[in-house]
Image (cartoon, grey):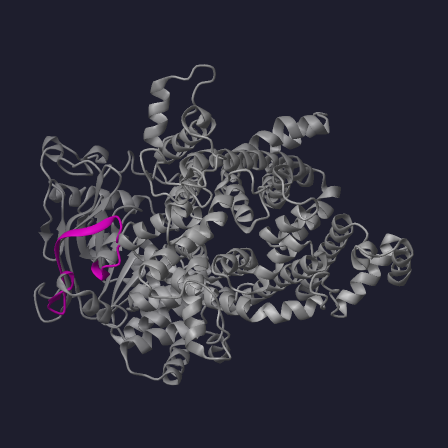
Amino acid sequence: MLMRDSIGDDVLLDVRDLETHFYGEESVTRALGGISFQVKKGETVGVVGESGCGKSVTALSILRLLPKLNAKTVGGEVRFQGRDLLQLSDREMRQIRGDQIAMIFQDPMTSLNPVYTVGRQIAEAVQIHTNASRSDAMAKAKEMLRLVRMADPERRVNSYPHEMSGGMRQRAMIAMALACSPELLIADEPTTALDVTIQAQILRLIVDLKERTGTAVMLITHDLGVVAETCQRVIVMYAGRIVEQATVTDLFARPAHPYTQGLMRSVPDRRRGRQRRLPEIPGIVPSLREPIVGCSFAPRCPFATGICSEQTPILHDVEPGHAAACWRAEEVVGA
Amino acid sequence: MAAYVLRRLISAIAVMAMVGIFVFLLLRLAAGDPAAVIGGDTATEEMIAGIREQLGLNDPLPVQFVRWALSVLGGDLGTSIFARQPVLELILQRLEPTISLSILTITLSVTVGVSFGILAAWRTGGLADRMLTAFATLGFSVPVFVVGFFMIYWFAIRTGLLPVQGYRPIEHSLKPWLVHLILPTVTLSVPYIAYIARIARASVLEVLSEDYMRTAAAKGASSYSMLFHHALKNAGAPILTVIGLSFAGLISGVVITETVFNIPGVGRLVVDAVNNRDYPVIQGVLLLGSGLYVLINLVVDLSYTLVDPRIRY
Amino acid sequence: MILSAPVEYVPAGRLRIADLSRLAKRHPLVAVGGGLLALLIVLAFAAPLYAGDPLNMDPFARLQPPSAGVWFGSDNLGRDVFARTVFGARISLIVGLTSAAGAALGGLLIGIIAGYVRSFDNIIMRVMDALMSIPTILLAIALISLTGPGIAILIVAITIVQLPSVTRLVRSVALSVRERPYVEAAVCGGARLPKVLWRHILPSTIPALMVQCAIVCAEAILIEAGLSFLGIGVPPEIPSWGNMISSSRLYLSIAPLTVFAPGICLAVTVLAVNLLGDGLRDLFDPRAKRRR
């Protein structure tokens, strides 16, 4: 695949040095320690990492949906089609949410409002962003349910969430998110809460709809397998930072960060069967409450040397379009 | 659903039967011999015996109870000893001021209480929230009649803005009716506003942390729509319970408020009845008050289905 | 305090100042409410030591404004409002505390039995439902009309009025506790019914009961004052806050303090009890604090 120039007209979302903090009783958690990445028009980007690495916080920071009480984006820019979302008024931000950037959440069981019908919730998104009448919006909701291949959309449009299965609810969530044809769809672990058989269907649906509508997708997942099947580019996060960024082919062929390598080794490989125990990455994720000196992965890293625990590595290209934040990236690639 | 309604109806009837027994026994225990009471001070031994026979007071107690219960169900609550008038008629005559006060109080406390609670929940720790905490603590602690006299002192005596007390029937003209009811309504609403606001705040706060609220925000919904459509409808069931329960017992506050503001309603009627030892009237008000309580509870329980589609009986 | 440390109990036997100050720091509501209530109790029962005769009438000093002699002025019969207010506190506190204690003990007993001995449960709870469905003041009025006004019947009436809420609470706790493994183990081990109730079920109801006790006490004081205000509570010859307000209300415009002095005292007393109750709830259930 051809890597296009990183700066250009086709850049949809340009995140620069995004920094988000969570405030506790007496401590500050640096959930995002200044991350930068881009999403191009129509592209599917995977964001991978363990739970707590800042994947979801990134999504919520972009949409400014962080809990108001204890979280704040303290620095950086989120340029979407040239405008810095962090500088917009609440009103302008509302016009973007759901219309140009939409989001699908992890748990479809709790993410739909239980007291309104699914149709009404989809129609609501339409009505907020267009002057469609109630009946037009409901017609659109039906159309969207058909688009996400919901069985019996005529009836389901009047169903309440509790009357549906998890997979159906996630289809409804997708219908809601795509109702206003957004430029960017952020999907936060859209299949994690679903049965394995349903997971594949929902993923296929997202990929399929993306092809049809041309929407860019930012797919947050902890599952490298999902990334391999659906994405063009991957961002690997660890402890609130991006540690590696590459095309899917490059990443899987030549992982340049020890953490990425560790992640890949811990993915079960069907060909190998059950022969041996999966290796795990030793050690624990560092606390983000204290400032981290050096590379945050150093304590767990088999490649770590003196410099790793003293200076923070910067994200740099190891080959065109493939960046890693590791002092020994060049050696790691070959390893 | 039908089975649930039936079950709920049966338990309501059981409770009312229990109340009936209680009220019936109370009258017998308190009033002593009804024949002597009806006969009055000048009645002779024979006259009383005659009345006894006539009223069937020589029958066993359960028989008397059934007879009494049947007549109550037929709408006959007995005759007032003091006013020599049917109790039901007496109560109906006094109903207008009491109902006016109750309806105005419910309207005021639900609107103010619910919005206050939502506002406090929306910005926890903010001004509205801190005001609510202070107001609720005070509202639970200052008795209704003390609030009432403060209101009278400041808004009637000192400033002359509103009438001190009294009541003007609504059929004469609307304005004096409303003007005379402003202070009583505000007074009686204070504890209810505090209570409703506190429950509304707690239930909305719980709902606000739900995932679907984030979904609504991600859709671009406005704060107003999130609070008043998405949150309020979910927080509705507990708020509804509280509203139902508190207003089912509204008569307690009404009795005191009517005394403070000298309103000739059912509350005054029952207080006067106690002073006159007019037991049939006490009994009648007691029965109607409890009946209303049971009825409102029933209606609240059944109306859950309207608020929350997940509840199916 | 979102993540509060585990509740620290004051060690039995020795109560040190340091423990008290730590309690006050962690749970200011308990300290403020409890302190205020203690102060009110001391002031009320030491009344004869510092206040004049609350019953002494002086026809030549009616409705006097406040002065050095009569701090809160005098009422329509020339009685010292300050003395009456202070003595009135005794009635409120006695009625409030005794009926709260009565309701707590009665409710505890009935509630535990209802929650554990299933055959009594249905009938007990239906009776409680019936009691609850009669509006508070009306029920108290009905009970008092049995004998006519008096302090004893007042306490009994308020106790009965408050009984259902305590009973329901204790029953619900007992119902949940009886399913716990350690209770089942005790039953399987052959423990007899009274012992199971006493050793295993009673202790777990105590925290919730204490909070409810404060609520009941505040309610009781309010009901007493309300009934006395209506003229059917404490007999008029005994000074109580409700009585005072009732007899002074006609003079509100001339001598507002005759109404407001007892009124404010009443509010402060109920406030103290309510604060104590809120504080106890936070102490026993720190998570509730954030929700409230």
Q: Nearer the viewer, residue C63 or C92?
A: C63
Q: Quadrant of residue B80?
A: bottom right
What is the residue that sits farthest to the top in this orientation? C14
What is the x, y in percent for residue A150? 45, 74
What is the x, y in percent for residue B289? 63, 60
Q: Quadrant of the C terminus of chain B?
A: bottom right
Q: Quadrant of the N terminus of chain B?
A: bottom right
What is the x, y in percent for residue A96? 22, 70
Task: Say if residue A190 shows up in the picture.
Answer: no
Q: Quadrant of residue A230?
A: bottom left
Q: Quadrant of residue A139?
A: bottom left
**Magenta-drawn stretch contains A79:** yes
Does residue A206 appear left or right of residue A2 in this picture? right
Q: Does B34 sit above or below residue A39?
A: above
What is the x, y in percent for residue B114? 40, 61
Q: Does A272 sit above or below residue B238?
A: above
Task: Say if residue C3 shows up in the picture.
Answer: yes
What is the residue that sits farthest to the front in this orientation? C60
Q: Nearer the viewer, residue C197 or B12?
A: B12
Residue positioned 68% across, 41% down in the render: C114
**Magenta-drawn stretch contains B120:** no
Does residue C83 appear left or right of residue A286 in this picture? right
Give the magenta range. A62-86
